[in-house]
Image: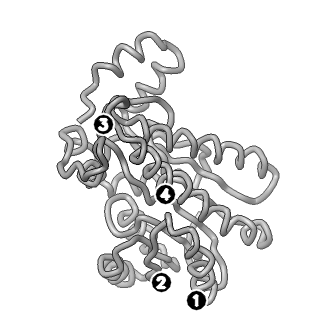
């Protein structure tokens, strides 16, 4: 399967996994729609993608600005006329114990990771169903499958995504609509740097576990291979696969191991 000439909308495209996916997709001569809050950084990514052979539309947006979604979709349609693939990658993580984390932090993370995600999906889903094909790829996390220390809000937001998109997989099983949930483990990006602490301030440093993770480029390659195979759920990372196995088949050992893993 090739994505040549397909219109691919990527959120969180200014850095990390989103940027890496954009660069990999650009090699297939795609039409890319790149979204994130920082327009100037998106322009840099777009230039790299154009140099690789893609046609790009820079579409700056905040996924929690729900009133702007219709206008942004119209801009996209005015440029390319359709959306073939939506990769919902925008998100933010957390570092803070459950009892110490302000409720507003829980709310903010849910607004970005869950409501921002499904708002875009609901904006493009009707047109994908009408055109008779489409692919929606939510970037979840290993903690969308199991809980993890200091990630209560983050894990909750990702678990919510699984409930939503697994329902879509069932509802549209007989339609030509692909829904591929991606669960990366520790990837070497700035996700920990940009995480929210218990009081909502920026964490501001790279976790040691994150620093030892696989590259965003390698992660993007795995994601795209999985998309091409239409895998409904993809777990990325050997340690993560082990934890998923333990939770499913040996729960007592899972809880013992998970409680002792360094959260940073």
Find out whether the residues at labels 4 and 3 contact each other: C-beta distance under 8 Å. no
Numbered label attached to residue 57: 2
Q: Residue furthest bottom?
A: 78
Is residue 149 something that shows in the picture?
Answer: yes
Q: Position of residue 220 (x, y in %)?
A: 40, 57
What residue sits right under mark 4 in the picture? 224
Position of residue 165 in the picture relative to residue 140 (left or right): right
Q: Which is nearer the eye, 234 or 122? A: 122
Q: Earlier in the sequence, mark 2 or mark 3?
A: 2
**For discs 2 and 3, the disc positioned in front in the rendered view:** 3
- Estimate the spatial distance between the alpha carbons at disc 4 and disc 3, rounded to whole Å: 32 Å
In the rendered view, would you say 65 is above or below 222? below
What residue sits right under mark 3 in the picture? 96
Find out whether the residues at labels 1 and 2 contact each other: C-beta distance under 8 Å. yes
Q: Earlier in the sequence, mark 4 or mark 2?
A: 2
**For discs 4 and 3, the disc positioned in front in the rendered view:** 3
Crowd around label 2: few <14 · some 14–19 · many ≥20 (10 Å): some
Crowd around label 4: few <14 · some 14–19 · many ≥20 (10 Å): some
Quadrant position of residue 26: bottom left
Q: Earlier in the sequence, mark 4 or mark 3?
A: 3
Q: Position of residue 167 (x, y in %)?
A: 71, 44
Q: Earlier in the sequence, mark 1 or mark 2?
A: 2
Q: Earlier in the sequence, mark 3 or mark 1?
A: 1
What residue sits right under mark 1 in the picture? 79
Q: Secondary structure at mark 2?
A: strand
- Estimate the spatial distance between the alpha carbons at disc 4 and disc 1, rounded to whole Å: 24 Å
Residue at point 58% right, 85% down? 75
In the rendered view, would you say 240 is above or below 56? above
């Amino acid at each position: 399967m090739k994505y040549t000439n397909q219109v691919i909308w990527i959120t969180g495209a200014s850095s990390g996994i989103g940027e890496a996916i954009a660069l990999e997709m650009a090699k297939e001569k795609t039409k890319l729609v790149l979204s994130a809050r920082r327009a100037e950084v998106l322009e840099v990514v777009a230039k790299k993608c154009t140099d690789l052979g893609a046609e790009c539309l820079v579409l700056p947006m905040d996924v929690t600005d729900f009133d702007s979604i219709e206008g942004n979709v119209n801009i996209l349609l005015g440029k390319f006329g359709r959306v073939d693939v939506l990769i919902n990658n925008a998100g933010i993580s957390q570092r803070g114990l459950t009892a110490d984390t302000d409720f507003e932090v829980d709310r903010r993370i849910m607004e970005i990771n869950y409501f921002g995600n499904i708002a875009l999906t609901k904006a493009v889903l009707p047109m994908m169903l009408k055109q008779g094909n489409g692919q929606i790829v939510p970037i979840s996390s290993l903690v969308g499958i199991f809980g993890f220390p200091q990630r209560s809000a983050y894990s909750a937001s990702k678990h919510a995504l699984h409930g939503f998109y697994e329902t879509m997989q069932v509802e549209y099983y007989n339609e030509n609509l692909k829904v591929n949930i991606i669960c990366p483990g520790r990837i070497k990006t700035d996700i920990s740097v940009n995480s929210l602490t218990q009081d909502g301030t920026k964490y501001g440093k790279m976790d040691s576990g994150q620093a030892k993770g696989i590259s965003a480029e390698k992660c993007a390659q795995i994601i795209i291979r999985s998309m091409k195979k239409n895998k409904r759920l993809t777990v990325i990372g050997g340690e993560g696969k082990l934890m998923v196995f333990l939770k499913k088949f040996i729960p007592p050992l899972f809880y013992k191991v998970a409680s002792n893993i360094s959260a940073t």
